[in-house]
Amino acid sequence: MTCPLYIDYTRECIRKYKRVIQVPSFDICQSNLYAECPIYNIISGHVKMCEYTDICDKEVPFIGVDFERLKYISNKFCLHGNEGNCAIYKLRKAGVEAPRNLSPDGSIRILIM
Ligand code: SF4
């Protein structure tokens, strides 16, 4: 079974979360594993999400993120009321602009543009 948002070989979730285009693998979308996809669960209303999710979708680079990393970050920092653990969330709550290369776990990624 494939994800209900994977239609005609297209990830329709991209209409809501453009950063999905940066995740190259379709393995999750084309299998039963879609039920573990944080994007699917956000759009389907199955999980409580951080108030800044939409801002992060526009500002946080997703390049090089695979599905396991997406699940780890989403479940540990962005969803299920865990946003208080997120380094980006803490800065935004304090009114400080978060660096684009800051990850939710506080690590700094090297961005190649
Ligand atoms: S599994 Fe996730 S990334 Fe794939 S189509 Fe569904 S919502 Fe989009």
Image: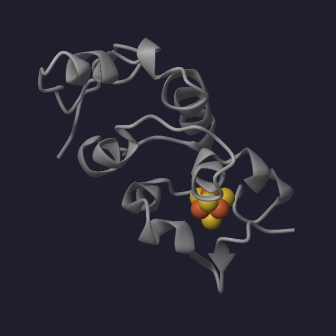
On the image, the x and y values in percent for residue 82 come to: 53, 20
With respect to residue 102, does 70 lie above or below? below
Drawn side of residue 67 relative to residue 32, left or right: left
| Quarter of the rendering containing residue 72 | top right
> Which of these two is toward me, 40 or 19?
40
Spot the residue most to the left. Answer: 96
Q: Which residue is drawn at 34% across and 15% down?
A: 107
Drawn side of residue 75 relative to residue 112, left or right: right
On the image, the x and y values in percent for residue 67 come to: 60, 43
Q: Which residue is drawn at 43% across and 59% down?
A: 17
Whether residue 26 is visible, yes or no, is: no
Q: Which colour scheme is used?
A: one colour
On the image, the x and y values in percent for residue 60 come to: 29, 40
The picture quadrant for ligand 1 comes to bottom right
Drawn side of residue 58 relative to residue 28, left or right: left
Q: Which residue is drawn at 61% across and 45% down?
A: 38
On the image, the x and y values in percent for residue 106 come to: 34, 13
> Which of these two is toward me, 112 or 88?
88
With respect to residue 39, does 107 lie above or below? above
Which quadrant of the figure contains the N terminus? bottom right
With respect to residue 38, does 18 lie above or below? below
The number of numbered badges drawn on the structure is: 0
Whether residue 31 is visible, yes or no, is: yes
Q: Which residue is drawn at 38% across and 62% down?
A: 18
